[in-house]
Image (spheres, grey):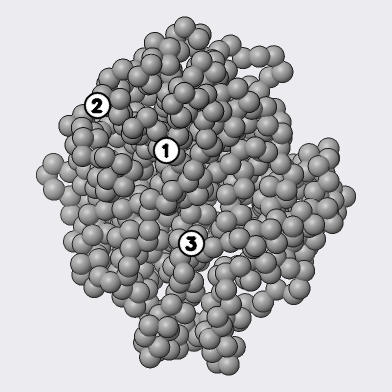
Amino acid sequence: MPGQLRDYFVVLPDSAAGAAAAGQLPVPEAAAGRPSAPDATGPAREVGDTLTVAHPSGRPWVVARPLVRKVSHLARGEDALVLIGPDRVPDAVLADILQGARDRTGLERRLARLPGLYHVVARLSGKSWIRGTATGLRRIYHARHPAAGTIASDRPAVLARLIDAPLDESALALRLLDFLPHPLSRRAVWRGVHETGAGYGLALPVAAPGTTAVPGPTEHRWWEPPPGELPLAEGARRVKEAIEASVRAHVGGLDRISCELSGGLDSTVLAFAARETGPASLSLLTVAARDRYSEDESWARRAVEAARNTAASNAPALDHHVIPADDAPYFYADLASTAAELNDEPHPVAPGRARAELLLGRARATGSRYHLTGYGGDEIFLGLPHAYQDLFHGNPFTAWSRLGGLRHQLGWPLLPTLKALLDRSAFPRWLAGAVTAAPQPVARTPLFSWGVRQSPHPWLTEHAKTLIAEEFRAAAEHAEPIDPWRGRHVDIDGVRMGARHFQAMEDIGMTLGLPVAAPLYDDRVLEATLAVRLPERISPWRYKPLLAEAMRGVVPDALLARTTKDHMSSDEHQGLREHAPQIAELWTGSRLAEHGLVDSRHLLRLAAEPFSPVLVEHSISSTVTGETWLRTAENAWPTSELPPTTTPSEASL
């Protein structure tokens, strides 16, 4: 059956209806070669692949199918704490967190010391508290069940199944844009399913004494960006500690692990950090580029040579696997394979899924038990030009000096740069005009606004454009930025956008039976980065200066000196030509067209003209992603009812 959810958890109310809902949860197939289900302590019951943690009444509270992640659980009286993440948290640590927590604030203070990417589910004074991560890689959704009331989960499709929710055409239309900014990125693609914002948690109250009515859920902010006050040296120390702790949380204690070593700075850092965890075997995988001007492979080989030259006597066995360029599929290859996963929403993984599957498949063939990537490094450490407006308000002379270097690199004219720098437009006003039919800025236009201004693709229907415009207009009426400072808002929004997309990589790995992680998306890494003074964190003359300083002494200086970055745009354009017949098949019987969102005849013409100027100006990636995701979502479950995961009597144990 295509598109099954291979892992998820739900948080249920303490009621007979909640227990009955547990019996209606979908039963996914086991991923090939997946690890055995994790254990847990305390009043929990494991039935097959399902782990159930009970309410004090014995009814199911948390029901989880954690094929890769591990569940840690501890109860103290009627209070309890469940952590779902990459590593088993010792009972002593759980006890210390739970014992000193009198309320949500106290709980969060203690959780702040914990590295790793965890979902948190807590029960304090009878109320359930659920939250994901500030980076947005771990998210929370909730929906109103007709009988059980509010149910929460990390997977919106699970909730959509439980409440029989239809797809939301407006949310689908939004996903056809190249960029979906805050807060519209939170629009779930099923009606009646709601996403809790990153940095916010969800509180599920209990019924008042003597009543059966349960109030609806409330959101509370638990995370704030730290002030940027630290000097580079102190900030680099904290970043180093955060990266190393996150890597240990994912692969510490494992004997055979692998890393993607593209040759870029981020993957190089992760490879050296992984070596420090002491595995018996470390496999590094590099995909060679077709572009003869590419530098990634040569830098990857330098990194391997440096790692071998600096290896201690007890260093892990190091293998370097270079995948020939001709073995790597072009983008848009094997689009039908995207049906193997039901992602939370249309993520831009469809065009490159075959490439990702090749790399992860080769990693699994090495015997790796966990695969690390450097995803997140660009969003967290690169720094976008928008940050210079923040710097200008606090230190105009330094900002203008730095902008001189940036203007020289990007070709920004003087007067437009100054005008953009002095702009004070509020976030709601920017959001209301973020999607427009007006001509888009040329490459030499300064970028200091709240995000990316974009135009709808020309193959979108008027219906789709109207839905998109209405969504942006409605969101602008009540929108608040993530942070009052534009640069920090854009930086954090970019991190969260990248984190959402990476989850699709995790799902591909789960399909293949290989856990995949991006440790740089750890909250502690983001916090340590934002805490550094802005002029020391980014620079037009240095490439990712904070990351380079943080890993000095772990990564050889010669590798930290790289200032270039490769791109694969040629493989994408060539993929449009190589796989034009498969792309054309998508638009024959297009599901998006059936929903009235795209003009399939226009798309068919473009499929026959892969080098059309229209496709140079407008990427078709988001539309391909939307089409393939929609086909998977429509066929996610069979028409006949799936057997329940537990019977009502089992669920109460």
x and y percentages locating residue 154 in the rendered image: 49, 36
Q: In which quarter of the view is residue 531 placed?
A: bottom left
x and y percentages locating residue 186 in the rendered image: 57, 49
Residue reaching furthest to the bottom? 415
Which residue is located at x 67 percent, y 27 percent? 164
Gap between marks 1 and 3 measured at Cα = 20 Å
Work out whether 356 lies above or below 1. below
Q: Quadrant of the N terminus?
A: top right
Label 2 or label 1, whichever lies nearer to me, is 2
Residue reaching furthest to the left? 313
Which residue lies under the disc numbered 3?
482
Q: Is residue 429 left or right of residue 195?
A: right
Circle 3: is it few (<14), some (14-19), or many (20+) Cα within 10 Å?
A: many
Q: Is residue 592 left or right of residue 138?
A: right
Q: Amino acid at mark 3?
A: Ile
Give the number of callouts.
3
Which residue lies under the disc numbered 1?
130
Which residue is located at x 66 percent, y 14 percent? 641
**N-term mark: 2 or 1:** 2
Which residue is located at x 59 percent, y 46 percent? 347
Q: Quadrant of the C terminus?
A: top left
Q: In which quarter of the view is residue 552 placed?
A: bottom left
- In front of the other: 290 or 29: 29
x and y percentages locating residue 222 in the rendered image: 38, 50
At mark 1, the secondary structure is strand
Q: Amino acid at mark 1?
A: Ile
> Can I make out residue 501 in this image?
yes
Circle 1: is it few (<14), some (14-19), or many (20+) Cα within 10 Å?
A: many
Which residue lies under the disc numbered 2?
76
